[in-house]
Each structure stands twice: as C-alpha cells, then as structure tokens.
Amino acid sequence: MSKWHALLIDDEEELVSTLVERLAYRGIEARYAVNGPQALELMENHPFDVVLLDLKLPGMSGSEVLAVIKQKWPGVPVIMITGHGGGEDAPMSELARAHDCLTKPVSIEILIAKMEEVLATR
Amino acid sequence: MSQNPDRKDPAQSPTALAFFGAVTASVSHELNNVISIVDQTAGLLSDLLAGPDPASTLTAERLERIATSISTQTERGVTIIKRLNTFAHTTDEDRIDFELNETVSNLAELVRRLADRRRVTLTVESAPLAITLSGSPFTFQELLFACFQALLEHAEAGNTLHFSVLGSDTVPVVAVACDRPQSAEAMDLGKVERLADLVGGRFTVISDDTHTAIELHFS
C-alpha cells in the first residue's frame, strides 16, 4: 500500500521516470508527465496527494500548469522545481504561489522530506 | 564584414551582456538536467544494489540500460560544454576570420531550448561550401540572436524558425525565417538595425502570406 500518490511533471522523461522508480522503492506510488496537458489529463483521472512541477516546461509553462492546478485542485500541494532557484528562472511571484520550491539537482531524500513536509501542513 | 570603428569593445555593452546571459542561462539549465539525470541514475543503481535481492534485479540487461543512460547523458553534456566553450571564446577577438556555417549552427544549437519552450521547431541549413567572414564573431551572433528573438516573439506553437546560410564567400547571406506572416512594422527590429550597422552588414525583411524572413547581407 503506497504512503501517498505523487505526480512528477518535467520534460526530461529519463529524469522523471527514474525518480518514479526510486520513489516506488521507498513505498511511494508516483506517475509522471512530460508536459502540461499530459499532467492535467492525469490529474483528471487519478487522485494525487502532491505534485512536483518543473517551472520550465515546453509549450504550456510550469506557471500556467500551476495556475490550473491551483484553480481545479486547490487542496493538492505543488512543489516547484527550478534550475537555479532564482532570477528569471524562478520569479518570486511564481514561487510564492507554490507550496514550496526545490532546486535541481535534488536528492531523493530531500525530495521525499519536502513532500512529507508539505503534506503534513495540508 | 567591415566593423564600425566607433565601438571599441562590443562584447561589453549592456545588450551584449544580456545576450551572453540569455545564452548561458539557457545552457546551464540544460546542463543541470544532464547532471540531475546522471545523479538519479546513479541513485537508482545504489537502490538496486541495496535491495533485498540485487542478483535478480540487477540483470545484465538492466545494467546495460543504466550504462547506456549514463553514457548518453555524458555525451550530451560534453556536446553542450563544447558548444558553450566555442561561444565563450568568440569574445576573445574583436576582429578575426570565422566560418559562417559553424558559427550559425553553434548559436542555433545553443538557443534551441528557447524555441523548444515555445514549441517552435528550430532548423538549420548550412551553405554547401565554407564561408569565411572577418569581424567580431560575438557581435555577429548577437545580431543573429536579435533576428531570432524578433521572429520568436511573434511565433506560435507549431511554427518553425529556420536559420540558413546562403550565398558565397564573396556575397555571404544569412537568413532567419519563420513560417508565419509578420509585417516588418510589427517587429522590434531596432536591435537588428543597430547590430547590422555595427558589423558592417545590412538587413532586409521579406514577408509574404506564409513566411517572414530577415536576411542579413555582408560584404
């Protein structure tokens, strides 16, 4: 039985598919999407407890995806993931709308700890 | 390409620094992804080794996939760093002979991610023969980037941006085109004009019902 269900959204498929597998080893069921529309479709069909979202997505941006999630699933915490944690890459206004933020590369332990943290404050 | 002698150090103007920043920021983001993938792949290998039955989970096929992933990402990282290094060294000399096909192709690859993010396809077409220009390769790339930005600003998802090197050694021409009609008046071409003047070239905008192209002519 999974502890919770996570959705990972990043256009680097090899990265998110590996993370999904590593989370599974730790008892966390996760799915991934490589773009915004795919992520929103998954959210329509599966209940997720937490979302990890890359700010820089091709096409529909991470900010746009975040706005839809906040509107349609306001109870689901979103952790933004950025390349460098600041500047144009991650404007403060965007980060403020998310529950928390992580900077790449992120260790699996920190990722899980952050997920637990946002879920505890839900 | 005869450069305007009024400007002593083109690589140090605010717009040049902004251009340098835009390129390096995009590239560093991609490098971060490469490092992240290698990091997670190594982590996965550790997970499998630490599992209850590594002998059955770590099959030869599995190990081969992991090795291929690390090798692919390493190759990707090396290519990115080579491109970035080539780009960085274009600031070394204000006036030098440089090959047009290589310079256009290198810049196009460095800015590809910016087009990808808008779901705009980027294509590059080189001239059949090498074309040598003399001048600042950095300012020339800044000019190309200004053309790219002017067209990308109006491009929509599904459009294609095309860099092409045309002409010959005696009449070099570079075109940056988009399969979307756009009038010259609606585009921000101030930077293109200033930079074209700076590198001693001229530009023309060609637009019809289906395409818009900015052609850069050098002599």
Image (tube, coloured by chain):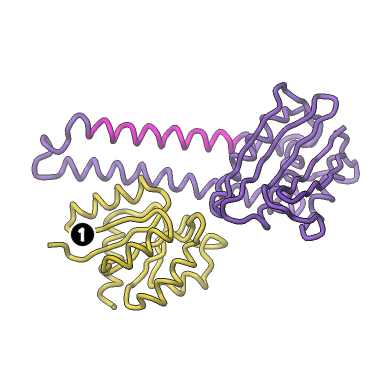
Q: Label 1 amino acid?
A: Ile
How many numbered discs sit on the rendered protein? 1
In the rendered image, residue B15, in percent from the top left (x then y), is placed at: 74, 54
Is B45 inside the magenta-drawn segment? no
Q: Residue at x 55, y 46 (%)?
A: B27
**For the C terminus of chain A, which image quadrant?**
bottom left
Residue at the front extreme?
B209
Tell me where residue A65 appears, x and y as whole percent: 44, 66
Q: Which residues are magenta?
A: B62-85
Q: Nearer the viewer, residue B189 or A18?
A: B189
Hey, which quadrant is residue B201 in on the image?
A: top right
- Quarter of image, res B109: top right
Dominant secondary structure, magenta? helix
Residue B83 appears at what percent x and percent y? 58, 35
Rendered purple, the chain in question is: B
**Residue B191: horizontal and vertical position, in percent?**
79, 53
The residue furthest left is B52
Residue B123 drawn above or below residue A74:
above
Above or below, B170 against B182 in this view is above
Secondary-structure class at tag 1:
loop
In what quadrant of the picture does the N terminus of chain A appear?
Answer: bottom left
Q: Which subunit holds the residue at mark 1?
A: A
Q: Is residue B73 magenta?
A: yes
Q: Taking B93 as reference, is A86 left or right?
A: left
**What crowding class fits label 1: few (fewer than 14 Cα within 10 Å), some (14-19), or many (20 or more)?**
some
Q: Height in image: B86 above or below A121?
A: above
Identify the residue at image location x=63%, y=40%.
B108
| Residue receiving disc 1 | A28
Q: Residue at left 32%, top 77%?
A: A75
Give the yellow chain's letter: A
Name the foreground residue: A59 vs A44.
Answer: A44
Using residue B180 as the reference point, say whether residue B195 is left or right of it. Answer: right
